[in-house]
Amino acid sequence: MRFIVAFLITLLLAVSGFAAEKSLLMATTTSTDNTGLLEYLEPIFEKDTGIDWKWTATGTGKALELGKNCDADILLVHAPPAEKRYINNGYGLYRKEVMYNDFVIVGPASDPANIEGKNVTEALKAIYNNGETFASRGDDSGTNKKEILLWDAAGIKDYNKKSWYKETGQGMIATLNIATEMKGYTMTDRGTYIKYQSNYDGKAPLQILVEGDKILFNQYSLIPVSKERCPDAKLKLAEKFIDWMTSDKIQQAIADYRLLGKKLFIPNAK
């Protein structure tokens, strides 16, 4: 009897160990999660590979920290300067570009600061000079990092000390909802905006007012966590995931993913 019990315990431990080895943990941004893209791709990945794929969605800054702390096997993020520092410091092995969209500045249809059609610098100066409400994620996400870069590029230094500048400390959908309630402006990636728009059957209170500037380009990349820093990181599974995400089949699946008939992400793996 003791032999049977010991055998069963050994078998259960072996099975659980095998299951853990076939499970991939990714840290990613709220935009890839909020848009529904990951839920759309998950069953395809598990069917194609037999690997159990789980993810934690947070801001890019926190996702990079999860990688540093060995709490993920791979990252899917969208803040290239921070990603390059992360790799140069030995935490990640390399960046593999996989898809992109762009950032847009949205606001109420009444557009009290009159920013529609302006370039990014003109629009931010108009919001600043008119003291109109601007909701910022304020969470060190890729979107927040880009927003700070845009204020700096516009030569505006004390925006975050103004009473009209509201840091939500929340994800993009929540920040869009707060901006809606406050009848203010915010900056978002286009994919998450389309998801927000779909929640209103295409008739969202906030509208795209500024778009198209080159500086608003928004690249998403995959980074496998370094096994030298994190010995338990599942590098083989991470690289299998990268090969899968950059395959012709899945690049096309990303291109085919739409809400309201609109593309949320554009594949660009090389």
Image (tube, rainbow, N blue to C red):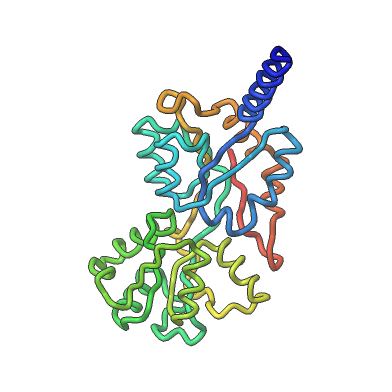
The residue depicted at 32 percent of the width and 83 percent of the height is 130
Q: Residue furthest right?
A: 47
Quarter in which the N terminus is drawn: top right
Q: Is residue 251 above or below residue 91?
A: below
Q: Position of residue 210 (x, y in %)?
A: 47, 72
The residue depicted at 47 percent of the width and 49 percent of the height is 78
The residue depicted at 44 percent of the width and 38 percent of the height is 67
Q: Position of residue 31 (x, y in %)?
A: 54, 56
Q: Residue furthest top?
A: 3
Q: Position of residue 190 (x, y in %)?
A: 55, 63
Given residues 6 and 102, the one toward you in this image is 6
Given residues 130 and 199, the one toward you in this image is 199
Q: Is residue 8 above or below residue 164?
A: above
Residue 157 placement: quadrant: bottom left
Q: Position of residue 33 (x, y in %)?
A: 58, 54
The residue depicted at 48 percent of the width and 87 percent of the height is 110
Given residues 116 and 53, the one toward you in this image is 53
Quarter in which the C terminus is drawn: top right
